[in-house]
Amino acid sequence: MASELTSLSSHIFAKFPNLVEGSYIVTSPKDRQYNCVAWACRESGAWIAPDLRWNILTIGREYGNWPEDLKKDMRLETFMNLFERLGFVACSANDQKSEWEKIALYSQDGFFLHVARQLATGSWTSKLGEEQDIEHITTTVLEGGDYGSVSIYMHRPIV
Amino acid sequence: MPIFQAEALHTFKVPLPLSHVFALWQNYSNYEHLITPKYIVKQVPSVSPLIDHILCKNLLDEELCFDVSILRSKYTVTWKTVRGSVTPHEANLLFLEDIKGTAIRCHFHTNTPRESLHVAANARKGFRSLPKKLKENIISFPGGDNLPLSLLSDDVFTMRFHELARTWIEETSFHSFVSRRVLHPAFRAILSMGPRAIPLILDELQRTNNSDWLWALEPMTEKNPAIAAKTIEDAIAAWIAWDRE
């Protein structure tokens, strides 16, 4: 029987036309304590976002672990600034350097929607909102649907 | 630099219940038919679920971004250009019900370093064409051919709520940002269900512990009894106590 550790909820497939059997594997249970941004920069205990949210465990509503002096909006360039602060610089899709890790920023109409991180194997890992983490073979797997498409790649040296 | 000021006022009546007419303005996809066909109107993420942002893009690719406030308890809709706009202006609609239907009072005001008379003239023209556009669109807007929510039985109303809630959760759970989730049409439809949906939202909040429901309660009631809550449980308790009162 399919469980949340082996498969995604069926409604997700309707939103991502390239997400098909064999293009991904589920790598975690559902978790509402961290999101795609946190997962991309290896902060799996945090929810990183510029918008207001209610923190379920602690202190009422708050802006999610967002730098005080960074703009609070959902534009792609704002998220690029965030990742620059975390040591990432823009690169091309083909840049491959050992000891560097790469991320892909997805957007639509100039608004940021998702970020995925490349693994040493060449495939990618994504946290799907409050749903599971998945490993997907290419960035295209999550394109063409609710995450828009990859607008920019960035990378940083692995510390 | 000189500052130009201008305003426009217009009031008209439509022979329909207030809830029916107001619901039309709570759905931004109706705006391109109601305000002007020259603009494509799109709701875009705002960092607070309590404020809506809409982007109006015209055929010349000029963009105007507005903060929209919908005060459901006072039946008012206000659009205000975001700070930094070249032609800052503000417009609001106030809806008033009487036995003959709904009166809509429109007010436009601009205060701009640019020549403003043509902006106000366009607003006046837009206001005057509203009755005709409303008449044309009122039967074609989503739900316009269904019974107004106020006439639904409790069972049907509850069923409608649960359908929308399920759709909203299923279609947005993979988004990392509340600002994106509250743009979903099902969430907008829940907001327009009004105070009658509040006990259903509280049940859902208790059942799922999904804090996103709190974002529906505040704009629906324009109150926040949970403002001092430190945990989600405190927030739920505060809302339940408020509902009992």
Image: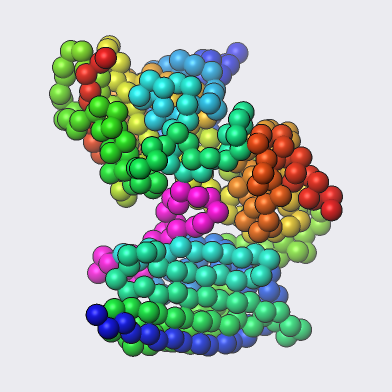
Q: Residue at x 45, y 21 (%)?
A: A44
A57 drawn magenta:
no
Q: Quadrant of residue B86?
A: bottom left
Residue furthest to the right in view is B244
Q: Nearer the viewer, residue A66 or B129?
A: A66
Q: Nearer the viewer, residue A75 or A23?
A: A75
Above or below A94: residue B142: below
x and y percent of residue B127 in the render? 48, 83
- Identity of the residue drawn at 71% across and 79% down: B97
* Foreground pick, A8 / B226: B226
In the image, residue B207 lies at what x, y percent?
A: 73, 33
Q: Which residues are magenta?
A: B38-62
**For the C terminus of chain A, which image quadrant?**
top left
Would you say residue A45 is visible in this rendering?
yes
Is residue B161 visible to us here? Answer: no
How was the colour assigned to the protein in this rendering? rainbow
Question: Where does residue B122 sit, x and y in percent of width and height?
Answer: 38, 84
Between B225 and B219, the residue placed more toward the observer is: B225
Residue occupying image coordinates x 27% and y 83%: B2
Q: In percent of the image, x 57 and y 16: which residue is there?
A: A2
Q: Quadrant of residue A23?
A: top left
> In this rendering, would A2 be left or right of B97?
left
